[in-house]
Amino acid sequence: MRVIADLCLVPIGVGVSVSKQIAACERVLSEAGLKTKLHAYGTNIEGEWDDVFAAIKRCHEVVHAMGAPRISSNLRFGTRTDRQQTMEEKIQSVEQKRPW
Amino acid sequence: MRVIADLCLVPIGVGVSVSKQIAACERVLSEAGLKTKLHAYGTNIEGEWDDVFAAIKRCHEVVHAMGAPRISSNLRFGTRTDRQQTMEEKIQSVEQKRPW
Amino acid sequence: MRVIADLCLVPIGVGVSVSKQIAACERVLSEAGLKTKLHAYGTNIEGEWDDVFAAIKRCHEVVHAMGAPRISSNLRFGTRTDRQQTMEEKIQSVEQKRPW
Amino acid sequence: MRVIADLCLVPIGVGVSVSKQIAACERVLSEAGLKTKLHAYGTNIEGEWDDVFAAIKRCHEVVHAMGAPRISSNLRFGTRTDRQQTMEEKIQSVEQKRPW
């Protein structure tokens, strides 16, 4: 089962800057061989379900190991059985509807 | 690693009522032996990371098998290494701060 | 336009415990006359759109005033035009599908 | 109060394709003069709090007017008082931590 997900991970108890932890997650996701795209409020992730969720678990482990005592994440994730669709195709399908 | 999560699963392409699919997810989570609590915009889930995420995968599989061609879920999930905390304790820790 | 929402507000830069801030938000929502229900990963809120979102803005203002330099919130919110539905009715409509 | 938000709006009861409605929301946000950036699981939005939330309300109104009887949205939104930060700066601050 393919999944397109979007992860927003918030380390708690490490102060006001969290970019170091987000960069570490990017690295985890990339090393897992997943297709990812960072945006201003999360990271798009595309891959097989088990690979995506194993990498997300690893993100929590790594951010805890970096010293964060607490993490609160928000994940959007979508699956479909009618057809395959990549992250790029999702964006294109919206862009094609722009008549303006 | 213990996790407290909150799942909001939205089947797409099955019409306007989605309660049948949510009830099926409740059953999946319950049969997985997880502690759960339904609320008006999702379901609280507490358990070991692997158990929680295996059950969430099963929810997507079951809702697709019920006929939904597409599912979009939103999941909040939190882990902590400083101490263990149950769903009830999270609620109590807020309620104890009510001075009003 | 009625809305049923679910707010999960995370203050950043105030340390590992955030229950004091969540309790303050509860008070803001309650003083706004909104129907609310705290759960283990957020707060259900029901009311008119403008009242709900004015109160959510006030939550951010109050939590900043309490000293949080940064806040990251997650909000689920649903509207419908086919019929009115309360928070209790949403829960009941799932519970009625439980055949197990 | 400036806010950086990320909106994922899901029309329910309009079938499996929702790109037409997402494109209409893009237009609403753009016509409101907000800075936006579409990604594979939502749309980044930056602006003044009242402008951003007025436009999000308008998105729900427009998507209902297009025929969707029900909408379920997920919104992440962040505010900070320690300093101003744009969407581009959020991304750059993560990219600068990439040592790999």
Image (tube, coloured by chain):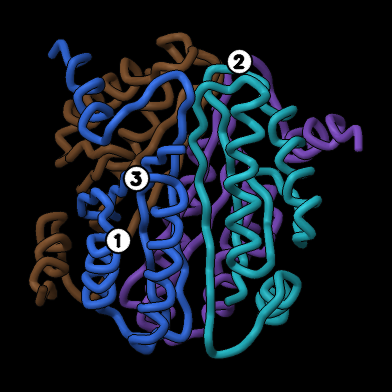
Chain colours: A purple, B brown, C blue, D cyan
User: In which quadrant will I find the N terminus of chain D?
Assistant: bottom right
Q: Residues within 10 Å of mark 2 (few under 14, many from 20)?
A: some
Q: Camera-side residue: D53 or A88? A: D53
User: Are the residues flagged by discs 2 and 1 in contact, CB closer than 8 Å?
Assistant: no
Question: What amino acid is found at the position of numbered circle 1 in the picture?
Answer: Ala
Q: Secondary structure at mark 2?
A: loop
Question: What amino acid is found at the position of numbered circle 2 in the picture?
Answer: Gly
Q: In the rendering, at what x and y percent does residue C43 appear?
A: 28, 53
Question: What amino acid is found at the position of numbered circle 3 in the picture?
Answer: Gly
Identified at 52% across, 52% down, the residue is D75
Marker disc for residue C32: 1
The answer to whether any part of residue D99 appears in the image is no
* Quadrant of the image occupied by residue C3: top left
Question: Is B76 positioned to the left or the right of B26 in the image?
Answer: right
Q: Camera-side residue: A4 or B39? A: B39
Marker disc for residue D15: 2
The answer to whether any part of residue B78 appears in the image is yes
Q: Does label 2 lie on the same chain as label 3?
A: no
Q: In the rendering, at what x and y percent does residue A38 appear?
A: 68, 60
